[in-house]
Image (tube, rainbow, N blue to C red):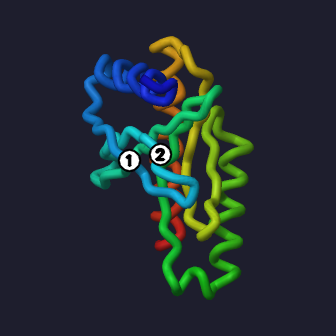
Amino acid sequence: MSNSNTHLDHVSEMLEKMDINHARETLETAEGDVPIIVAPFDVQGMTFDLIFFVDPEWIHIKCRVFTLTDEIKKNVEARLVLYNLCLTANFYLNKVTFSVDDNGHIHVGADMRHGIRQEDFEDELSSLIVGIDYFMQIMKRMLQ
């Protein structure tokens, strides 16, 4: 069994202890297939996919909270407002990290070392939920 699978087994065990439904999947990338765990999570009535993947030293969790629409891609000012709000949240919210992928989509994420203890894993995971909830509050304010 590869180290990736061993580390994902550990993630799966911790999710099971938290009674969080999840599934093993494979993500196709330009560099090849990447084994991942997907855990759908409901926040404020919406379902978000928490994506877990590993590298030799770290467990990574990413969750897309916003998909850029063509309208917003064209509206530089709106994107700057969104990105500024996310950077400000990174500054003020403990353990919450927003990021932007190559397509401009906004994610909330966390990184932790392999061998993390259950209580620390739960703490890291809760930071993602805080980040998702915070982002949804931002969007509600912007749409009012």
**Residue 41 shows up from this direction:** no
Q: CA distance from mark 1 to mark 2?
A: 5 Å
Q: Amino acid at mark 1?
A: Thr
Q: Quadrant of residue 31?
A: bottom right
Answer above or below: position of 83 versus 2. Answer: below
Q: Name which of mark 1 and mark 2 comes first in the sequence.
A: 1
Question: What x and y, as percent, mark residue 111?
Answer: 61, 33
Helix, strand or loop status at disc 1: strand
Residue at the spot x=49%, y=63% of the render? 66
Residue at 74%, 43% (x, y): give it.
Answer: 91
Residue 34, numbered label: 2
Mark 2, residues whose alpha carbon is within 10 Å: few (<14), some, or many (≥20)?
Answer: some
In the rendered image of this protein, does residue 77 appear above or below residue 121? below
Residue 84 horizontal/vertical position (percent) = 71, 62
**Nearer the observer, 135 or 4:** 4
Q: Which mark is residue 57?
A: none
**Do tag 1 and tag 2 residues touch (Cβ < 8 Å)?**
yes
Measured along the vertical axis of the image, is residue 51 above or below residue 99? above
Location of mark 1 (residue): 26
Vertical relation: 112 (above or below) 75 = above
Which one is in front, 33 or 129? 33
Residue 51 can be seen, yes or no: yes
Three-letter residue code for mark 2: Val
Q: Pick whichever, 80 or 142, lies toward us.
A: 80
Q: Residues within 10 Å of mark 1 (few under 14, many from 20)?
A: few
At a point 43% along the width and 28% down the height, the residue shown is: 5
Q: Looking at the figure, which quarter contains the N terminus?
A: top left
Total numbered labels = 2
Q: Is residue 41 left or right of residue 107?
A: left
The single residue placed furthest to the front in the displayed view is 1
Q: Is residue 52 left or right of residue 39?
A: right
Dot 2: what SS? Answer: strand
